[in-house]
Image: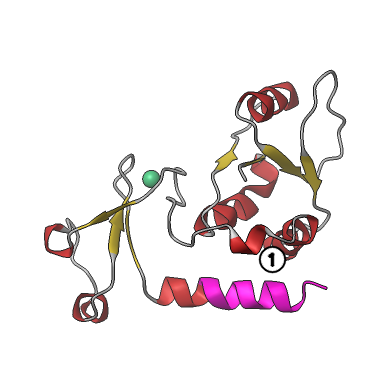
């Protein structure tokens, strides 16, 4: 499932990316432009705004909270099967590109020792060059997810 979120819910958008969902985060563009992008790229429009979409069909999820964790819960509630489909750490949080695994020995940045010691996978964003590895980040994500699902009812 692909998503589009507006600037207002950008943080939620970054978390959807962390969870592996192709998510476009719009800058400050007009509502009409957001709708056009949603239609053209077949994305589910996630927004706090209940502004109607006129003339076209767009799949929508409304979130009401102003906090990302609760928003994530709302998205999961709207599509209960979502949890099984995302691939954690498969997308760049910054630019939404699919990450590529790279040889750790060719990593352009120095890895923290604990990461270098373990045989953790290192991934690189082909577009912006950001480097990702599994570490504390992952633990935090999983904890947040667990919390999200625990309070999901
Ligand atoms: Zn990137």
**Residue lying furthest top in this view?**
55
Q: Is residue 116 above or below residue 8?
A: below
Colouring method of the image: secondary structure
Q: Residues within 10 Å of mark 1 (few under 14, many from 20)?
A: some
Task: Describe the element under mark 1 as helix, strand or loop.
Answer: helix
Q: Quadrant of the C terminus?
A: bottom right
Q: Measuring from the top left, give residue 35's x and y in whole percent.
A: 72, 26
Compared across the picture, whether 129 is left or right of 22 comes to: left
Q: Measuring from the top left, give residue 134's x and y in whole percent.
A: 36, 70
Labels in figure, total:
1
Q: Is mark 1 within 8 Å of ligand 1?
A: no
Q: Residue at x 13, y 57 (%)?
A: 106
Which one is nearer the viewer's eye here, 153 or 111?
153
Q: Residue at x 67, y 39 (%)?
A: 6
Q: Residue at x 63, y 32 (%)?
A: 28
Q: Residue at x 77, y 72 (%)?
A: 152
Compared across the picture, whether 18 is left or right of 106 comes to: right
Whether the magenta-drawn stretch holds residue 65 is answered as: no
Compared across the picture, whether 107 is left or right of 81 comes to: left
The image quadrant where one finds ligand 1 is top left
Q: Measuring from the top left, give residue 55's x and y in whole percent.
A: 84, 18
Magenta segment, which residues? 141-153
Compared across the picture, whether 16 is left or right of 32 comes to: left
Q: Measuring from the top left, give residue 115's x and y in whole percent.
A: 26, 76
The residue that disc 1 covers is: 69
Q: Is residue 123 above or below residue 9?
A: below
Which one is nearer the viewer's eye here, 112 or 147?
147
Q: Main secondary structure of the magenta part?
A: helix
Q: Quadrant of residue 58?
A: top right
Q: Quadrant of residue 114?
A: bottom left
Q: Is residue 143 above or below residue 99?
A: below
């Amino acid at each position: 499932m692909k998503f589009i979120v507006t600037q207002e819910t950008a943080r939620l958008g970054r978390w959807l990316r962390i969870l592996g969902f192709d998510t476009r985060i719009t800058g400050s563009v007009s509502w009409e432009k957001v709708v056009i992008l949603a239609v053209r790229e077949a994305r589910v429009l996630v927004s706090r705004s209940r502004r109607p979409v006129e003339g076209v069909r767009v799949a929508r999820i409304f979130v009401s909270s102003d906090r990302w964790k609760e928003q994530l819960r709302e998205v999961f509630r709207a599509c209960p099967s979502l949890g099984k489909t995302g691939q954690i750490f498969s997308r760049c949080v910054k630019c939404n590109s699919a990450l590529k695994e790279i040889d750790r020995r060719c990593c352009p940045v120095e890895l923290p020792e604990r990461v270098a010691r373990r045989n953790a996978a290192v991934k690189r964003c082909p577009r912006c060059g950001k480097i990702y590895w599994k570490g504390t980040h992952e633990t935090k994500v999983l904890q947040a997810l667990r919390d999200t699902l625990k309070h999901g009812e």
